[in-house]
Image (cartoon, helix red, strand yellow):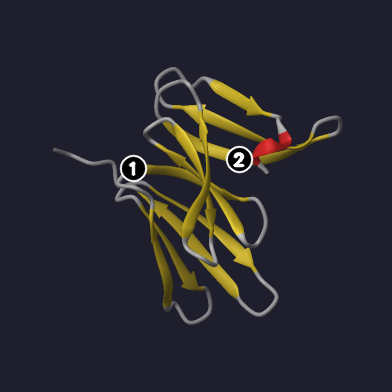
Amino acid sequence: MMHNLYMHFLINEKENNVELIASHWDANIRIWDFHSGELIKRIRINSVHLGGICLLDEKYLYAACKNGTIKLVDLEKGNIVGSLEAGYGEIINVEKIYHSFYGVCLVSQNSGNNQIKLWKNKNYL
């Protein structure tokens, strides 16, 4: 079986260090020290292929999962603290945006028909 070997990357600038964070199809989020290249932590997300990632803040990250969920991950503790059910296909990307009326929102994209969903309920933040 052929797997898509996509990785998604972002930078997390913290007070004392800079981290490079990557999600991968193998269900892992890996965090490296940006300057030394040392692997700091690996967080496994329940055996699901991962898509895009975005930071809520320097402590929390959203991960798009191919099982139709978005996981909220505590980067310091290395565990899942919340989950959103998209109600449609595989989620391949998630982004945090700001709307002048709703404030911080999420936008997710599924892989089947590129359907986009706006998450504007602040209960997930």
* Separation (CA) of disc 1 from disc 2: 17 Å
- Residue 105 in view in this figure: no
* Residue beneath the point at 48% across and 82% down: 36
Instruction: Tell me the quadrant of the picture where the N terminus can be found.
Output: top left
- Asked whether residue 119 appears in the rendered view, the answer is yes
Residue 14 % position (x, y): 66, 71
Task: Please report whichever mark, 1 or 2, sits nearer to the chain's N-terminal start.
Answer: 1
Helix, strand or loop under label 2: strand
Residue 5 drawn above or below residue 75: above
Mark 1 sits on what residue? 49
Question: Badge 2: few (under 14), some or many (20 or more) residues near its Cα, within 10 Å?
Answer: some
Q: Can you give x and y, in whole percent of width and height, for residue 119 in the image? A: 65, 29
Figure quadrant of the C terminus:
top right
> Considering depth in this image, is 31 or 44 the residue closer to the camera?
44
- Residue named by callout 2: 95
Labels in figure, total: 2
Classify residue 100 by image quadrant: top right
Q: Quadrant of residue 58?
A: bottom right
Q: Position of residue 42 (x, y in %)?
A: 39, 65
